[in-house]
Amino acid sequence: MLTQPTTELLLRGIARDLSEQIAPDLQSESAKVALGMIVQLLNGCATRTAHEIAWMHEEADAIMAAVSPIDDPATVTAVQAFRAAPDDLHHDGAARRYHLASEALAAAVEHAYATSDDALIATLRDLLQSRSAHEMEVVGTLELVGRG
Amino acid sequence: MHNPSEMPARLASFLALNEPDVDHIEVTSYEPMTGGYSRILAKAETVWTRAGTRTTRTFVVRGDPPADKALIITDRGQEFAVLRAVEGAVSVSRAHYLDATGEHLGTPALVLDHVDAASLLPHMAGRDDAANADLARPLAEAAAAFHTIPLDALPPELARPANWDAYIADRIDEWRRTAHAHVESMPILRYVAAWLDAHRPPPVELALVHGDFQSANLMRADDGRLVVLDWELAQIGDPREDIGYFKAVATAAPPDVTALDEAAFYGRYRELTGMTEEQINPAIAAYFLILGVIGTVRRLVEGGAAYAKGENTSIGSAFSLSSVMFGQSMWMAGCAQLEMVFDAAKSAAGGAS
């Protein structure tokens, strides 16, 4: 299979062509709004295709390192579910594993607040901020097209 | 409404049905409008003939999109009832007619007065922050106008929470429910719920909450009053949610008028609502910046989930998840900043006692 140009490059090229060559010729306001959304989504897809599977694995590994020692039934159950899921580089499998890791993180957060464990809250908050930083790379500069 | 070419005839028939004393009503133009994501809008010019006298009237028709394009599901009948209830107290686009089932206009829809006023966003975009600061006081007045309407004057369609504690607990829990209902885990929503629960503010009286109070839903009349549009998400709740929500949207699409002149905004709002400084101040507003967005967030997340499951083909639903991700970064940062403010206030109170 040919991997060049990359999927990321192709998606960014399509987004650019839509913005520069198609958008100026549109007359309909609703079509312009839809195209504005599509261009932003395509750029987000470009970032995702370049990094998403790696990010999911990295975040899941970091979550497991932090939450595995926690003695809380909900967290323990979530960790066990994660460990039972096969490691997978295909998207569906990777997303399933990431979902299970995220459930373990959520359970740990609720346990940390229920027990007022400030140190654990701080650790888990760092993991959530790392997740959010990746999301913001996907979002890029959010433009609320069509409002106002 | 889904077929604009049919609409002049459909709308003329609908208006005639509601105005039997008018001899003839003609729709002379019907133009789809942009301006909102959730409903389809159109501007209609009409000519009315009554006892030989011709008058012109301009309306906005606001209806539901096709089911598979619906970003959120709301009730036009409830929106109509709310608009009729608030119109004496708040500057709104007057609601004249309701097609609750869509049998006349092809989709459930309202027919509203077209407001001859400037949209607030472009009005603000042409001015600097110093000039826009003069909007802080009218913004406080616009919010207070519907936050002080007695609950018994509001339509019965709006659910009445038992009390503030039950309401706020349920509102916080909505973050958890939204996370649990989604197609994948959303740990940031569950973190926010835990944080909100641990930092509850002082209670206030429940009131009418607009639910989508943002600059894009405001217009500025010639006399300086702000006209409040788009009441589809109205409910009874904690009124501070609207202020928090306004700040949330303004963070993504500046300016935040409440922050341009905090003394004017909060001072006028307290004066009109009777709230104390402990009950509403910039830090409490920031708490509600986070809490108050959950109603909209839930609907956006539901739309995104429907898209993910192939139940919805609206590109807007997929796009809206970008707003949710943007929001998650704001809520994380907001919780951290507020925690410092609340801790400092607690320390100061401890030191003073």
Image (tube, grey):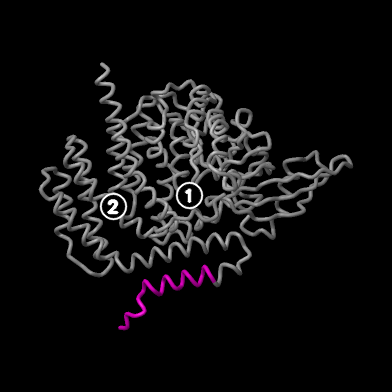
Is A41 displayed left or right of B119 in the figure? Answer: left
Label pair 2/1, CB-CB below 8 angstroms: no
User: Which residue corresponds to the image point at 51% horizontal and 36% vertical from the top-left?
Assistant: B210
Mark 1: which amino acid? Answer: Ile
> In the figure, is residue B266 to the left or right of B110?
left
Residue drawn at (49%, 25%) of the image = B267
In reply to whether residue B178 is colored magenta, the answer given is no
Mark earlier in primary sequence (2, 1): 1
Residue B154, percent across and down? Answer: 54, 28
Q: Secondary structure at mark 2?
A: loop
Q: Position of residue B217 (x, y in %)?
A: 56, 43
User: Which quarter shows the N terminus of chain B?
Assistant: bottom right
Q: What span is in magenta?
A: A1-20
* Residue pointed to by mark 2: B185
Q: Chain of mark 2?
A: B
| Residue at the disc numbered 1 | B72
Chain bearing mark 1: B
Q: Is residue A58 above or below residue B166?
A: below
Residue nearest the viewer, comparing A52 with A99? A52
